[in-house]
Image (cartoon, rainbow, N blue to C red):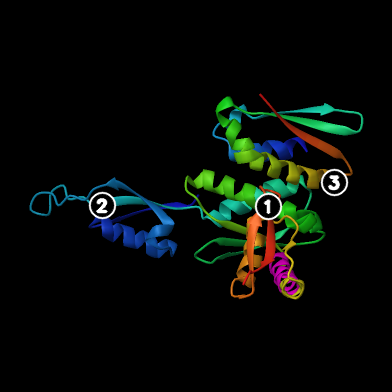
Amino acid sequence: MKSIEASGKTVDCAIDKALNKLKKSKDEVEIEVLEEPSKGIFGILGSRLARIRVTIKESPSDIARDFLNEVLSQMKVDVKFETKNTGEYYYLSMSGENLGILIGHRGETLDALQYLTNLAVSRKLAKKVRIVLDVEGYRKKRENTLVNLALRLSERVKKDGKKITLEPMSPYERRIIHTTLQEEKSIYTFSEGEEPYRKVVIAPKNR
Amino acid sequence: MKELVEILAKALVDHPEEVEVKRVEGEKSVILELKVSPEDMGKVIGKQGRIARAIRTVVKAAAAKEGKRVVVEIIQ
């Protein structure tokens, strides 16, 4: 972890100097006051500058990357990371060769890795953070598939007037189905069953 | 595979120094026995076994690559 010391006439002054040098904002660092300034007598004798130490905080994406690198090296897969902070969550996208094993059946391995990464990072930072893992655009592709599936099945429910139960999905995937169909007037959606086998049901509204 | 379970468990618990994984060879499969501090049991099992299930899913994916059947058991 990188840290530097700085001094100045006041504590704030010293902090500004250090932040300028590191090119960081105040919430990206931890500040420790080593010595309070003192004016001394008549501003000459025994005057002392403020001394502080500024340490760059590890970002959630860095911790997530370290954790995943360790895990993935055991799985003998080599990945490159691209990270993005959306404000709502930290998005880590992995790319490389033969990453199918990181996705698994309907993304179950990717979801498991994502869940464990969230727990590991939140524990290390002692606060809840949200991390979304992706492999080469898989999340977006899957989202498109689910939107299409929802639209197609809703048409069938409207036509046949009979409800349809989908296969088990993760909360994130179920939300995509619910959101896609929430504006529909003649059908409605709900979930039933227990995790991890919870399923979405698309049903006709009774007039 | 043993190291993988260790890494995952150590990242989740409050007492990583008490994480132990024992490898037991079966005829067709390998059993990995995970032992953690009693206080940390919930941290590797989770509500309705959600964390344990995630650990097993990741280990299964790693094992499949090597063509092995691996079972993760959490023991007291």
Compare marks 2 and 1 and give the one earlier in the sequence: 2
Q: Residue at x 74, y 48 (%)?
A: A73
Label 3 vs label 2, nearer the camera? 3
In the image, are marks 2 and 1 on the same chain? yes
The subunit carrying tag 2 is A
Numbered badge on residue A50: 2
Distance between the alpha carbons at the discs numbered 3 and 2: 59 Å
Instruction: Residue A149: name its quadrant.
Output: bottom right
Question: With respect to residue A176, does A2 lie above or below?
Answer: above
* Local secondary structure at mark 2: strand
Q: Residue at x 41, y 55 (%)?
A: A29
- What type is the residue that disc 1 sits on? Arg
Q: Residues within 10 Å of mark 3 (few under 14, many from 20)?
A: some
* Local secondary structure at mark 3: helix
Magenta segment, prevailing SS (helix, strand or loop): helix
- What type is the residue that disc 2 sits on? Ala
Relative to residue A97, is residue A35 drawn left or right? left
Instruction: Determine if the magenta segment contains residue B73.
Output: no
Distance between the alpha carbons at the discs numbered 1 and 3: 26 Å
Question: How far across and down, in percent of the image, does residue A98 sit?
Answer: 82, 59
The subunit carrying tag 3 is B
Question: How far across and down, in percent of the image, does residue A111 sit?
Answer: 68, 53
* Local secondary structure at mark 1: loop
Numbered badge on residue A185: none
Numbered badge on residue A198: 1
Relative to residue A48, is residue A81 drawn left or right? right
- Asked if one can make out residue A78 in the rendered structure from this viewpoint, the answer is no
Q: Which residues are magenta?
A: A138-153
- What type is the residue that disc 3 sits on? Ala
Distance between the alpha carbons at the discs numbered 2 and 1: 59 Å
- Asked if one can make out residue B76 in the rendered structure from this viewpoint, the answer is yes
Which residue carries the number 3 mark?
Answer: B64
